Image (cartoon, helix red, strand yellow):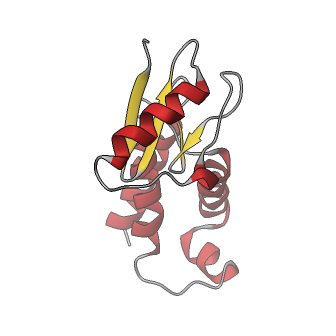
């Protein structure tokens, strides 16, 4: 049927040109029943090709990447860090954690794990590493 299948933990995703949804659901139910599992009907979601397709919190359309809200959060933090300085940014957002740079760096690295060619995130990674070294 030329359907692609991907899985992350217990989330299953199927994609293809023409999918007979009803037959696919019956097929999946039959297979997972053999494993003593059940299908959660509330989690079934159909996504069209021209919409943002998010599976397990990751955009999976043409390339995998962070959702827009996560990218915007990173951008916002980097903007204020670059504009006002790291310490001033921490005071403004009322954060006192010593590992805040590592926290932001972790978010950036997660985005790069999804899409290693993301030049914006590469730039942020370099800036955060420099900040961390000079801390």
Q: Is residue 96 above or below residue 28?
A: below
Along the line of sight, the residue nearer the viewer: 101 or 26: 26
Q: Residue at x 36, y 48 (%)?
A: 33
Residue at position x 57%, y 19% in the image: 19
Q: Which quadrant does the C terminus fall into?
A: bottom left
Q: Quadrant of residue 73?
A: bottom right
Classify 69 as above or below 47: below
User: Where residue 5 sits: x, y (%)?
Assistant: 40, 29
Residue 122 visible in the displayed image: no
Q: Residue 16 in the image: state x and y as whole percent.
A: 52, 17
Q: Position of residue 42 (x, y in %)?
A: 63, 54
Q: Is residue 104 left or right of residue 95?
A: left
Q: Quadrant of the N terminus?
A: top left
Q: Residue at x 67, y 57 (%)?
A: 76
Q: Is residue 34 visible?
A: yes
From this viewpoint, which residue is outermost toward the left? 35
Query: Front-most of 66 and 124?
Result: 66
Which quadrant of the figure has residue 112?
A: top left
Against 100, residue 123 (above or below) is above
Q: Position of residue 70 (x, y in %)?
A: 61, 53
All told, the count of numbered labels is: 0
Residue at the image position 66 percent from the left and 66 percent from the top: 84
53 and 84: which one is in front?
53
Relative to 52, 127 lies left or right: left
Q: In the drawing, does residue 135 fall left or right of residue 17?
A: left
């Amino acid at each position: 049927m030329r359907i692609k299948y991907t899985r992350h933990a217990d989330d299953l995703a199927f994609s293809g040109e023409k999918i007979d949804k009803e037959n696919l659901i019956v097929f999946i139910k039959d297979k997972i029943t053999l494993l003593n599992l059940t299908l959660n009907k509330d989690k079934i979601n159909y996504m069209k090709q021209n919409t943002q397709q998010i599976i397990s919190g990751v955009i999976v359309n043409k390339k995998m990447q962070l959702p827009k809200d996560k990218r915007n959060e990173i951008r916002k933090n980097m903007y204020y860090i670059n504009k006002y300085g790291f310490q001033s940014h921490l005071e403004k957002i009322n954060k006192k954690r010593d590992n805040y740079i590592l926290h932001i760096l972790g978010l950036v690295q997660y985005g790069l794990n999804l899409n290693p060619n993301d030049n914006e995130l590469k730039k942020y990674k370099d800036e955060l590493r420099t900040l961390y070294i000079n801390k």
